[in-house]
Amino acid sequence: MSEVLLVDLPSIHVENSLADPDTCKFIVSRILHPGGPFFFVNKERAAGSPLGERLFSLPGVSNVLIAESVVTICKEPTASWLELKAAIGTAIRMQLLTGVPAILETVYTSIQGRSDVELNTVIQELLDKEVNRSIANHGGKISIVEIREKKLFIKMSGGCQGCASSQVTLRHGFEVMLKRVTPEIKEIVDTTNHAAGKEPFYPRHESEVDL
């Protein structure tokens, strides 16, 4: 489902997430900031970055991801998109009109030295609000085992344990999203005993192995 916020240039297209009703993408017809992605888990993390500060000033905004011309907003479950979408569009448009960079990278870099505990919190939120909601349709779940030396150790369960498509879900789904919000994580280590999976969504054939 998509819609267009009726504003003067730049145009902004809004795409609702099918996996998470609390997440929307705002696709702008201009580059907001080159490079990235830049992820702000809360208002404090956005301090010093003009667009981040504008967006977090809106009641109901939970976290913000900015990547070139796309802004992904996750709202609080109690907030309504009805008024929030228009307010976000206005904030983005006003930021572009100022001519001030949307992200001050020196400030952003200085606050991104996140601890393992902070990384765990961000990743768990990604799992809860995006990944696990999606794969729950297949009876699957991904859980954090630990974070150590910039490596994320995970375990897959339910329909994902032993599933022939588990590595596609992990490498082309979860890992792609993970790199956007926690670029500090250098590797995902799957600790799952897939051979013990009792109810895989797609059963493996004997000839199939993980590479």
Image (spheres, rainbow, N blue to C red):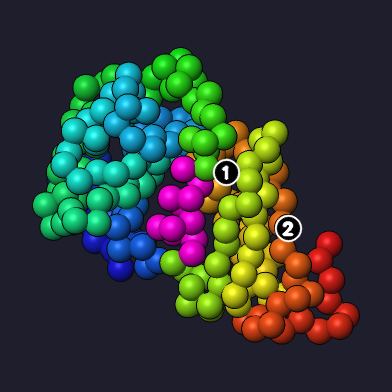
Q: Amino acid at mark 2?
A: Thr
Q: Which residue is mark 2?
A: 191
Query: Which segment did they paint magenta?
Result: 121-132
On the image, which quarter does residue 200 sit in? bottom right
Where does the image place residue 127, in percent across and percent down from the top left? 49, 56
- Residue at 51% from the left image edge and 47% from the top image edge: 123
Front-most of residues 2 and 184: 184
Q: Is residue 158 magenta?
A: no
Main structural element of the magenta stretch: helix, strand or loop?
Answer: helix
- The residue type indicated by label 1 comes to Lys
- 119 w.r.t. 140: above or below: above
Q: Earlier in the sequence, mark 1 or mark 2?
A: 1
Which numbered tag is attached to residue 63?
none
Residue 128 included in the magenta stretch of the image? yes
Residue at figure coordinates x 48%, y 17% from the top left? 110
| Relative horizontal placement of residue 48, taking residue 67 as reference (left or right) | left
Pointer 1: what residue?
179
